[in-house]
Image (cartoon, grey):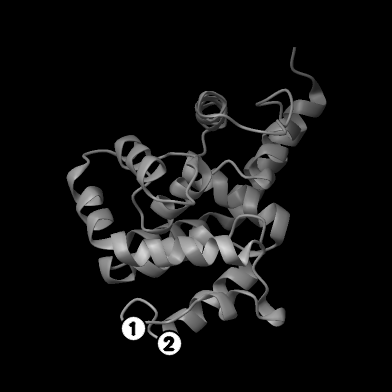
């Protein structure tokens, strides 16, 4: 049963969304405008972010771009283990980046050939080393191709619990659980009248104070 407190919380959420709506829609338009030439480093970013701050991952990607990692023979591990922008599990993630370089032409073809966002995500999860459902969705969102799929990180899950969309925050998430949570997020989004993509950025801004990628 809903309470007055529930209604007040949802009203506050809608008010927050209204205050940020223009910035959120501008950010989503920026994602949709990303050129395919930028996809490689967007995917590299999403491979680096698990258990690492977005700031560190972003700075490492900037360094990889400066040394033209995509085009030249560069060992990424020293960049990832730099103390000022340390990436957790840098050895494993360095291997993932090198594998990404080898397989990126195949990845581009798959993105073009799979017709809808769920199919694109399934292919990415099954074929790109280091990508789970969260990371694959994050990548698709950052290039404007997620089509309402949800990035279920801890920030999002905490807020879904806070607003009663889910009962608890799971400690681990299987494929089946991810898809179930995603459906719960979509139902909540529809109920309050804010698109899932926009609500994702509202929740991120609540946690971090910025509308980041």
Q: What is the C-alpha distance between the residues marked 2 and 1? A: 8 Å
Q: Which mark is residue 145?
A: none
The residue most toward the bottom is 66
- The answer to which quarter of the image holds residue 97 is bottom left
Say which of 153 and 76 sits in front: 76
In the rendered image, residue 3, in percent from the top left (x then y), is placed at 79, 20
Residue 59 in view, yes or no: no
Residue 94 drawn at (x, y percent): 51, 67
Question: N-terminal of the two: label 2 or label 1?
Answer: 2
Q: Is residue 69 left or right of residue 200?
A: left
Q: Which residue is mark 1?
A: 72
What number is the disc on residue 67? Answer: 2
Q: Residue at x 17, y 45 (%)?
A: 113
Q: Position of residue 49 (x, y in %)?
A: 58, 60
Q: Nearer the viewer, mark 2 or mark 1?
A: 1
Residue 174, placed above or below residue 128:
above
């Amino acid at each position: 049963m809903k309470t007055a407190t529930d209604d007040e919380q949802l009203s506050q959420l809608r008010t927050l969304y209204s205050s940020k709506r223009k910035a959120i829609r501008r950010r989503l338009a920026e994602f949709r405008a990303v050129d395919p030439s930028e996809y490689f480093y967007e995917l590299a970013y999403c491979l680096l972010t698990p258990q690492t701050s977005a700031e560190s991952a972003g700075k490492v990607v900037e360094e990889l771009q400066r040394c033209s990692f995509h085009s030249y023979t560069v060992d990424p591990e020293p960049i990832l283990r730099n103390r000022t922008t340390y990436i957790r599990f840098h050895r494993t993630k360095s291997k993932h980046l090198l594998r990404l370089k080898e397989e990126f032409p195949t990845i581009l073809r798959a993105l073009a050939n799979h017709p809808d966002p769920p199919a694109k995500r399934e292919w990415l999860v099954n074929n790109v080393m280091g990508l789970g459902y969260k990371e694959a969705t994050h990548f698709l969102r950052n290039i404007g191709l997620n089509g309402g799929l949800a990035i279920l990180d801890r920030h999002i899950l905490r807020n879904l619990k806070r607003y009663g969309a889910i009962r608890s925050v799971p400690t681990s998430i299987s494929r089946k659980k991810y898809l179930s949570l995603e459906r719960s997020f979509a139902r909540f989004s529809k109920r309050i009248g804010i698109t899932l993509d926009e609500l994702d950025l509202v929740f991120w801004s609540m946690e971090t104070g910025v509308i980041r990628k």
